[in-house]
Image (spheres, grey):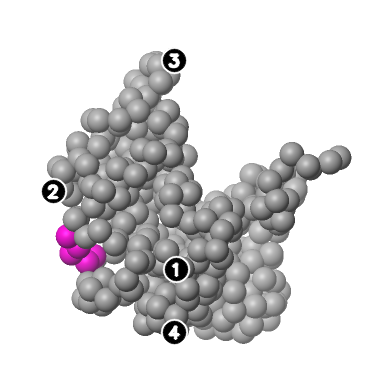
Amino acid sequence: MSNDFLTPLARELPASVPFVGPEAQERARGAAFTARLGANESAFGPSPKAIAAMQHAATEAWQYADPEAHELKHALAEFHNVSPDHIMIGEGIDGLLANLVRLTITEGDHAVTSLGAYPTFNYHVVGFGGTLATVPYQDDREDITALWEKARQTPRTKLMYLSNPDNPMGTAHSAKVIEAAIKDIPAGVLLVLDEAYADTHRDLPQIDANTPNVIRMRTFSKAYGLAGARVGYGLSAPEVIAAFNKVRNHFGMSRVGMAGALAALQDQSYLKQTVAQIDESKARIAEIARAHALICLPSHTNFVAIDCGRDEAFAIRVMNELLERGIFVRKPAVAPQSRAIRVSCGPEDAMDAFEKAFEATMAKLA
């Protein structure tokens, strides 16, 4: 079939997606997973108050959501002690990234990121005709010095992407390091600081909301337990935030999702409880790894990277054996991080299932 209707750029793009979802894998294997521990979701679930709010909002689902997200935006502004014009709400961080790249990147422009970092950013950059410039990780952390230098050396660099805490390794830089780096952002470059895991990180930087060359990305998909609701938001200077209105889908948000996010934000005691459960789960995963003479990387997120102790090929075997045993996990894609598997935190029954499957896997691969 002819694809002449596609743009030249679209014709050249690879027919690929950043992730293969667990549902697709379940269909391929002909069975559901026993434990879903690969997508960094919160298996502890959302606040009961958020569930109740979404149930009520479902009765109003015949109405479009408020395109200004007025109530949630003002609640977030109060929470962060900023004005509402510092905040843009969107369909998760992924949706916000798509709009940001659309606003800033055209053919011939570059974006700088870490090799092996969160792939959706790359997906959008390439999809809008941009070119990626990458630097390797250093000691399983994104190398800020190398990223900044790459941006200076690369012509027409518009964006730098830094995830802190990091996905897929779970590592993080201190607030002091991030604050110092922000003072040295290369001229003409906007730093995309992805803080999806901010709620599980105890050393967040203090950044003036009026800083014009930084946009921070936050989400309700992780510790708040609302991945399926698709609610994220950006924090930046008003002139950066206002630009989103030129391209965003004004009716892209769901009334149900926004109601859930608002109730979740207002239930900080439940968030605190969830973070404590995440900490307990991280400790449990570390114990399981140690039982097989393996170590975990220090995690500032709601998942743990287990160093499988060998090379990528062995880590793939571990992951596939776990998948065969009904445990959905993922792994980093680029060496040397690809020697690890990534396991999301979860409640006790999920950890029990993971422990049993991991023990059988390591026994088989010994």
Marks 4,3: beta carbons within 8 A = no
Disc nearer the start of the sequence (4/3) = 3
Residue at coordinates 62% horizontally, 49% vertically from top-left? Answer: 21
**Mark 1 highlights which residue?**
157
Q: Amino acid under label 4?
A: Asp
Disc nearer the start of the sequence (4/2) = 2
**Could you tell me which quadrant the N terminus lies in?**
top right
**Mark 2 highlights which residue?**
81
| Residue 264 sits above or below residue 10 on the image | above
Marks 4,1: beta carbons within 8 A = no
**Mark 4 highlights which residue?**
139
Q: Secondary structure at mark 1?
A: strand
| Chief SS of the magenta region | loop
Point out the stretch of residues depicted in magenta.
204-208
- State the CA–CA distance, disc 4 to disc 2: 35 Å
Disc nearer the start of the sequence (3/2) = 3
Q: Which mark is residue 62?
A: 3
